[in-house]
Amino acid sequence: MRNKLTITLLALATTAMAQNVIDVHSHIITPEFLSALESEGRQMEEGFPIPQFNPENHLKWMDEAGIQTSVLTLAAPQPTSAKVVRGTNEAAAQLKREHPGRYLFCAALPLPDVDAAIREAIYALDTLKADGIKLATNIEGQYLGAPELDPLFAVLSERQAVVILHPHRPNPVNQQVMQQTPLAMQEYLGETTRAVSNMISRNVLARYPGVKVVVPHCGAYLPLSIPRMKSLTPVMQANKMVGQIDYEANLSSLYFDLAGAHSPEVIRMLLTITTPDHLLYGSDYPYVAPQVLTQSLKRMQQYLSTEPDLAPFREMILHKNAEYLLGQSKTRPVPETYNGKMIVRLAEIEVYPEHLTEYLKFANEVDRLSVEREPGVICLYPMQSAEDPCQIRILEIYASDEAYQLHLKTDHFQKYKQGTLHMVKDLKLPTMQPLDPETMKLIFQKKR
């Protein structure tokens, strides 16, 4: 009986949480868009049939799933007509006006014509009041990060624009491979990683810091590719193949939606390259059946309620991060805590043996500087297993949510985080609940 009651209460809690969910990954598909693709013979260009989109059905599903707001973007493939792109943006703007609070939208641009894209971006942001811009990973082989796109990014940076990315068919593409393994199953992930890596290698986001970019599908392969990029950067620079890359600045501009195969493990992997305030819920409506999306959201709500290390980020991921990013809230999201005051963690880290000595130097430095310079850092105490020296444990105690958030933004923590990404084999950050917080305070008041 008690187990049934617990399950019922959990279900009620997750349903209540869902009422403010913001979905940053949904697509508008207009009749004009479909007609244009049909006239160009491109209905199956992405290797997948384009679904129907009906606002009434979408809103019905949002109500049933508990989603307050959906951000609409144009689906792939990109139409060649600037008129069709403009029509889609106008249709999205109309839906936003007709359903205030339920729809936001990011406008499409008529690339690869950069001048036309700039004009459309200005019109969409200034006149249509678009909430951001949607960019494809590539249009006719023009990949994000290409030098000719710099003027566009300069305009977007001036307007502090949010950019939502979506993978498109790579150019060129091997048709045989595409038939054997459809794009959505694998190449979309490679395509997203390719485009973002290209932007990073050219320092695009560091040079245009006003742009904030939402990366789709759980970050694709970026948690694996970024450490490799960083480890190879000195070799590439020595051979004059790349210039200086400000990884910290580039990564700080990236946000990640969790559309697709999300899981606690995927979120933990993303947290090796980003912070909890950069994770967003996404559905990929209408490309996935509504009942499947509903179950997927419920599963996310459940593990964000029951996984101790992820539970503090539950409402941040479901809606608070998106509200802040999209200008719906001016309050910077912070994690919840279990005791209402201090944050206590026992970081569990496994280091690759060949990097152990170097890692310990980084860890000792950041721990010392944090305790010395940050009043809100009560304790950062690193320990090494006597049986396996590659197993590191760090007792972390922060005075408050605010102290923890300030710590994440310090130069010494960012230096540690970016400098050790390739050294860490495994990382877990379980949040602990002190049994007696008042006694714990006394411990740190005692003198030696």
Image (cartoon, rainbow, N blue to C red):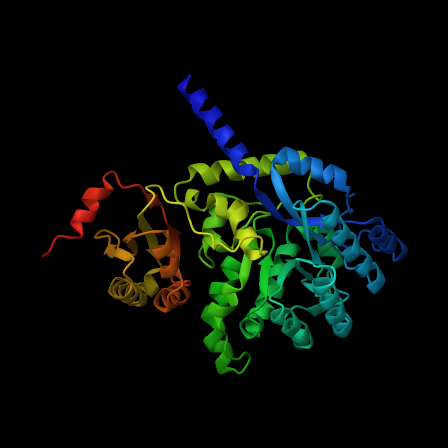
Q: Position of residue 275 (x, y in %)?
A: 45, 56
Q: Position of residue 130 (x, y in %)?
A: 69, 58
Outermost residue toward the left in this view: 448
At horizontal 80% and vertical 60% (from top left) the residue drawn is 85
Outermost residue toward the top in this view: 1
At horizontal 56% and vertical 41% (from top left) the residue drawn is 20
Residue in front for this viewpoint, 14 or 262: 14
Side of 80 where 391 appears, left or right = left
**Where is residue 241, by image quadrant?**
bottom right
Residue in front for this viewpoint, 343 or 412: 343
Side of 115 where 386 appears, left or right = left
Residue in front for this viewpoint, 56 or 206: 56
Side of 379 where 172 appears, left or right = right
At horizontal 32% and vertical 61% (from top left) the residue drawn is 353
Query: Quadrant location of the N terminus?
Result: top left
Determine if residue 81 is in view.
no
Query: Quadrant location of the C terminus?
Result: bottom left
Q: Position of residue 198 (x, y in %)?
A: 60, 69
| Relative vertical location of residue 418 with respect to residue 434 in this rendering, above or below | below
Q: Position of residue 150 (x, y in %)?
A: 65, 75
Determine if residue 89 is in view.
yes
| Relative vertical location of residue 211 with respect to residue 52 in this rendering, above or below | below
